Image (tube, rainbow, N blue to C red):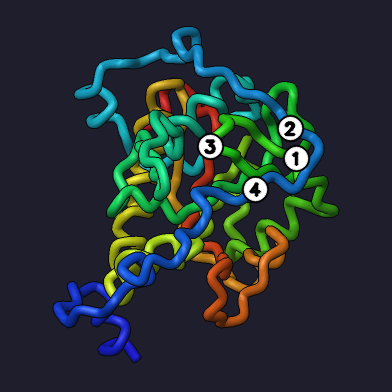
Amino acid sequence: MITELREIMKAQSEEYTSDQDLRLPQPPLNKASVSNKLISLTKDFDSVIKNNHFLNILNTRTSKRKYTEEFLTLAELAFLLWATQGVKQVVGRERKATFRTVPSAGARHPFETYLFVNRVEELEQGLYHYLPLEHKLEYLGAIENQTEKVSEAFCGQIFFATAAVSFVWTVIPYRSEWRYTVNAQKYVLVDAGHLCQNLYFASESIGCGACGIGAYEQALADELLGLNSDPSSAEDNEFVVYAASVGKVAKKEE
């Protein structure tokens, strides 16, 4: 199995006819909203940036797992969301694509962003979904015993479950497969690193810490988001692929 899985990390030289080549409809750029409770987000970030010295951010960036009980402001969360999946421009006529704050192979951007919110001003505790084209959040509802269920789904990592906000990224593989067929899986995993690195840098710039999470129980994590973990060839198949916790950190923390 290890040998087989290693092949995902290799570029596949054999060419396949893609659904794009067949002129099949491209998948949606993002999932549509399913909630009637939408929260508009600001793009005025001047007041939230505490450190814009890039070399300093590079030197101070570490994975931080210890957070204070301080709340994030809604503007700070808006900045983190924009820094990781924000849409700068929509291009194309018949076949549209988005230019975002992070790179993605072919501008396919196959990810969706969900949040487990604990301590963000103006937001209720619960599950949220980011709408990057609109730069809005949708509230998906409260989770009973949220801390316990999130901790269980993410392998007992209590710091993740109790952070001010925990980011969870899902992937809809067909967004990339539509163009890249058998190479899409490799590109998706590379792209996931891009967006989490941006979260690290953005967190450092506003006085927060972040910690990327790769350990989770797939079925439990997907279930918390209302997704089906079963293998599927459906074009809308979606599942958790990466996560990260974010919170305020003590000034002297190393």
Label 3's element? loop
Label 2's element? strand
Q: Earlier in the sequence, mark 2 or mark 1?
A: 2
Q: Earlier in the sequence, mark 3 or mark 1?
A: 3
Q: How many marks?
A: 4
Q: Which mark is residue 38?
A: 2
Residue found at the very far top of the displayed protein:
47
Q: Earlier in the sequence, mark 4 or mark 1?
A: 4
Q: Which mark is residue 32?
A: 4
Q: Residue at x 31, y 68 (%)?
A: 21
Q: CA distance from mark 4 to mark 3?
A: 10 Å
**As drawn, 130 above or below 49:** below
Q: Which mark is residue 132?
A: 3
The N terminus lies in which quarter of the figure? bottom left
Label 1's element? strand
Return the x and y of residue 214 as percentages of the image width and height. 45, 61
Q: Quadrant of residue 229?
A: bottom right
Q: CA distance from mark 3 to mark 2?
A: 12 Å
Q: CA distance from mark 3 to mark 1?
A: 14 Å
Q: Earlier in the sequence, mark 4 or mark 3?
A: 4
Residue neighbourhood size for the residue with mark 4, other residues' Cα within 10 Å, grouped as few (<14), some (14–19), many (≥20):
few
Q: CA distance from mark 2 to mark 1?
A: 7 Å
- The residue pinned by badge 1 equals 139
**Mark 4 or mark 1, whichever is nearer to me:** 4
Return the x and y of residue 49 as percentages of the image width and height. 42, 14
Q: Residue at x 44, y 56 (%)?
A: 110
Residue found at the very far left of the displayed protein:
13
